[in-house]
Image: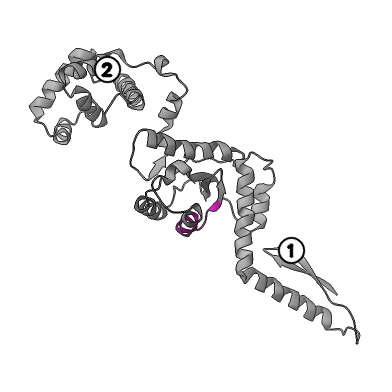
């Protein structure tokens, strides 16, 4: 008699029983099949299977990150009981994100796995990488992200989160987004423990330009030089105003100045830059130039 041992519907072994001192009876095949099912159930409970299943998922994710042939990976994961949804995110904790932490990667990974139990994980290029699957109309779980942020902050760690994507073939590209977001945040001295690529993609675009080829709005450059020469704070005032356009009271409160002082500064900014501070395209150009100046280390 021969029967299959199955885990998650996949045949992983066969059991064989031979006649020895007596012939098989009519009920033996049914008994033997039930015994095979019992072996299958017990194997699925075993911790070794659970660990190896995680390792199998890790192999698949590593293949995706290496841009290997991924044509059948979705089906293979489905066969193992991983029901992928419509969209994906990559969360990465690269070496640059470990910073001052004394924790080993394996310890960090074990804790992050507890926080994000539905993720597929691997350590790739000395980076902890997790693949999250979500429905298109869902965002990342706020509770899990809050717990992740708390853990990372407490241990001086940083994680990058990519934009969402829909095709597993794009995993490697979005992995780079997650890693880049941590690197750029470190360069800009951003203290956040979780770095979303959506907050840094403009800086990533700026990296394609050489410093001497990067253009800054001429009016903003005049304002910068004016501040440097007279030790004023017009650039700081403009940055706050662009965050809260038209909200003079809030801007004055955030800058700890009187509203009349703010109105004087805004008038000076208009005079020096030649900008009315009332046009949407003008706002966009000034904001972009401020990001360039921040990226180049020109702003405090």
The CA distance from mark 2 to mark 1 is 67 Å
Q: Visible in this render: residue 197? A: no
Residue drawn at (28%, 26%), measured in percent from left and top?
299
SS at mark 2 in the image: helix
The mark nearer the N terminus, 2 or 1, is 1
* Horizontal side, residue 204 vs residue 77: left or right: left
Q: Position of residue 59 (x, y in %)?
A: 64, 50
Residue 181 sits in quarter? top left
Residue drawn at (15%, 18%), measured in percent from left and top?
230
Q: Pick whichever, 155 or 113, lies toward us.
A: 155
Against 99, residue 79 (above or below) is below
Look at the image and give the residue range highlighted in magenta.
109-121
Q: Visible in this render: residue 9? A: yes
Query: What mark, if any, has residue 180 been given in the picture?
Result: none
Q: Looking at the image, do the residues carrying marks 2 and 1 touch, with CB atoms under 8 Å apart?
A: no
Residue 1 sits in quarter? bottom right
* Horizontal side, residue 63 vs residue 34: left or right: left
Q: Pick whichever, 207 or 285, lies toward us.
A: 207
Query: What mark, if any, has residue 220 been given in the picture?
Result: 2
Q: Residue furthest bottom?
A: 22
SS at mark 1 in the image: strand
* Horizontal side, residue 285 vs residue 87: left or right: left
Q: Position of residue 205 (x, y in %)?
A: 45, 26
Counting labels gives 2
* Horizontal side, residue 263 vs residue 156: left or right: left
Q: Is residue 256 magenta?
A: no
Query: What mark, if any, has residue 12 been given in the picture?
Result: 1
Q: Position of residue 292 (x, y in %)?
A: 35, 23
Against 40, residue 63 (above or below) is above
The quadrant the C terminus occupies is top left
Q: Is residue 115 magenta?
A: yes
């Amino acid at each position: 008699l021969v029967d299959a041992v199955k885990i998650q519907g996949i045949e992983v072994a066969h059991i064989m029983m031979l006649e020895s001192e007596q012939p098989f009876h009519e009920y033996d095949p049914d008994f033997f099949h039930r015994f095979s099912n019992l072996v299958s159930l017990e194997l699925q409970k075993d911790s070794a299977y659970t660990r190896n299943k995680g390792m199998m998922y890790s192999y698949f994710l590593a293949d995706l990150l290496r841009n290997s042939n991924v044509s059948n990976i979705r089906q293979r994961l489905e066969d193992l009981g991983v029901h992928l949804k419509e969209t994906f995110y990559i969360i990465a904790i690269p070496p640059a994100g470990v910073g001052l932490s004394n924790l080993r990667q394996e310890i960090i990974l074990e804790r992050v796995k507890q926080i994000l139990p539905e993720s597929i994980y691997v350590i790739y290029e000395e980076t902890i990488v997790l693949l999250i699957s979500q429905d298109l109309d869902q965002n990342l779980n706020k509770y899990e992200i809050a717990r992740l942020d708390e853990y990372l902050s407490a241990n001086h760690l940083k994680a990058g989160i990519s934009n969402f994507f829909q095709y597993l073939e794009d995993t490697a590209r979005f992995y780079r987004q997650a890693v880049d977001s941590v690197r750029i945040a470190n360069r800009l001295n951003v203290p956040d423990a979780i770095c979303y690529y959506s907050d840094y993609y403009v800086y990533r675009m700026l990296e394609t330009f050489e410093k001497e080829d990067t253009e800054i709005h001429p009016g903003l450059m005049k304002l910068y030089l004016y501040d440097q020469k007279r030790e004023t704070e017009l650039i700081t005032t403009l940055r706050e105003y662009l965050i809260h356009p038209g909200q003079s009271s809030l801007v004055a409160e955030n800058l700890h100045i009187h509203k009349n002082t703010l109105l004087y500064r805004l008038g000076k900014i208009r005079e020096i830059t030649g900008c009315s501070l009332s046009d949407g395209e003008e706002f966009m150009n000034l904001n972009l130039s401020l990001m360039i100046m921040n990226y180049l280390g020109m702003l405090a």
